[in-house]
Amino acid sequence: MEDFPIRTLEMVCLGSSVALSGLFYYIYRKKCKTVDKLNEAPVLPLDEKLADLLNATPGKCLQYVVVEGTVQSIGEPLRSQFQEGSVGVIQKLVLREHKLVWNSLARTWTDSERVLHQRVNAVPFNLLGVNKAFVRVLCPLEATGPKMEIVHEKFHQASYGFTDLIGQYLSGEKPKGQLETEEMLKVGASLTAVGELILDTDRLPKIRPPTDGSEYFLSTDDFETLRLEQEGQAEVWRVLACICALAGVAVLMWAGRRYYRQLKLRWEQENMRREFEMMGAGERGEEENGMDVSENACVICLSNPRGCVLLDCGHVCCCFRCYQALPQPICPICRQNIKRVVPLYQA
């Protein structure tokens, strides 16, 4: 029963390592597929020939391509609520609460952040190329990215009185304030789109999320930077998967080492038990032959002969069965700890 918590901890650590390793490896393989798709994706020039290329393609669809252009809104763009003159096609408003939370384990205050409100607005927009050629961007909110520009950021400091301070120390939470931010994908920004390019029924080229489940990208970086970023992320997930796998192997080796030690101890105890049983059988034969063993009787049971030497104190005072029945490995004579026990051979 004493080994039950340790074995449970071993199983939990091993299971967690295996699960995390499998999860990280799955994400790594998914990232590798994305990198392979990016490496194979053609970079198409955004000009007047793009529509003719799609028209000549079977199905009027290119499954995974790269298009780079300038953001242009269709109709009225979104206007910033805080910065006059800033217009864009995607707007993200976020209100975050920052506070200090008391950590009883570390005995210190730690920062905590919580999103109180978030709103994302978007309007239809095109990617504008040369000679007024364009590609319409569909479902921009389903894409990975883009990194939008922060046009407004303001921190509202929390104010409180003496009674608030007392309540904060009692509750373990101390508000710092609220951070208000506004991000926008501005009109005129350079944008790289990676997805499925189609020629719709209205004869307009459009880029949308790939129907085969590949990752859809909208990035304010150029294509080479985007590709290198995805390769770096794949490498990070690979390292995490390897670390978790090594941790699992380490836990498995540690558990195996513990099991081997326990097995070896059981072998030694079994050999010792057999040795003491053989010695006890000989002593019982002497007792049956009429020899008096009362002077050599075990001080605990007072019936069996003394048959073991307790080390390091060296006392010979009990039989092996009584030694095994001791609640703690302590010599019944001198109360010293028993490090090991050996059988007593009498000539």
Image: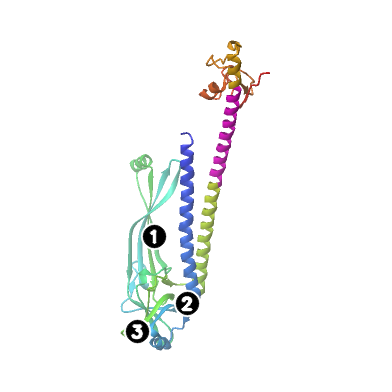
Name the residue that disc number 2 marks.
Answer: 41
Q: Is residue 188 left or right of residue 319?
A: left
Residue 216 in the image: state x and y as whole percent: 41, 71
* Magenta stretch, residue numbers: 253-279
Name the residue that disc number 1 marks.
Answer: 154
Task: Indicate which disc, 3 or 1, sits on the residue closer to the N terminus.
Answer: 1
Q: Is residue 85 visible?
A: no
- Mark 3 or 2: the one toward you: 2
Q: Residue furthest right?
A: 347
User: Mark 1 is on which residue type?
Assistant: Lys
Helix, strand or loop at label 2? It is loop
Helix, strand or loop at label 1? It is strand
Q: CA distance from mark 2 to mark 1?
A: 41 Å
Helix, strand or loop at label 3? It is loop
On the image, which quarter does residue 261 sit in?
Answer: top right
Residue 264 magenta-drawn? yes
User: Mark 3 is on which residue type?
Assistant: Leu
Residue at the image position 48 percent from the left and 80 percent from the top: 43
Task: Indicate which disc, 2 or 1, sits on the residue closer to the N terminus.
Answer: 2
Above or below: residue 186 compared with residue 269? below
Residue 210 in the image: state x and y as whole percent: 39, 74
Would you call the spot at circle 3 few (<14 residues within 10 Å), some (14-19), or many (20 or more)? few
Name the residue that disc number 3 marks.
Answer: 204
Q: CA distance from mark 3 to mark 2?
A: 21 Å
User: Mark 2 is on which residue type?
Assistant: Ala
Residue at the image position 53 percent from the left and 47 percent from the top: 252
Residue 135 magenta-drawn? no
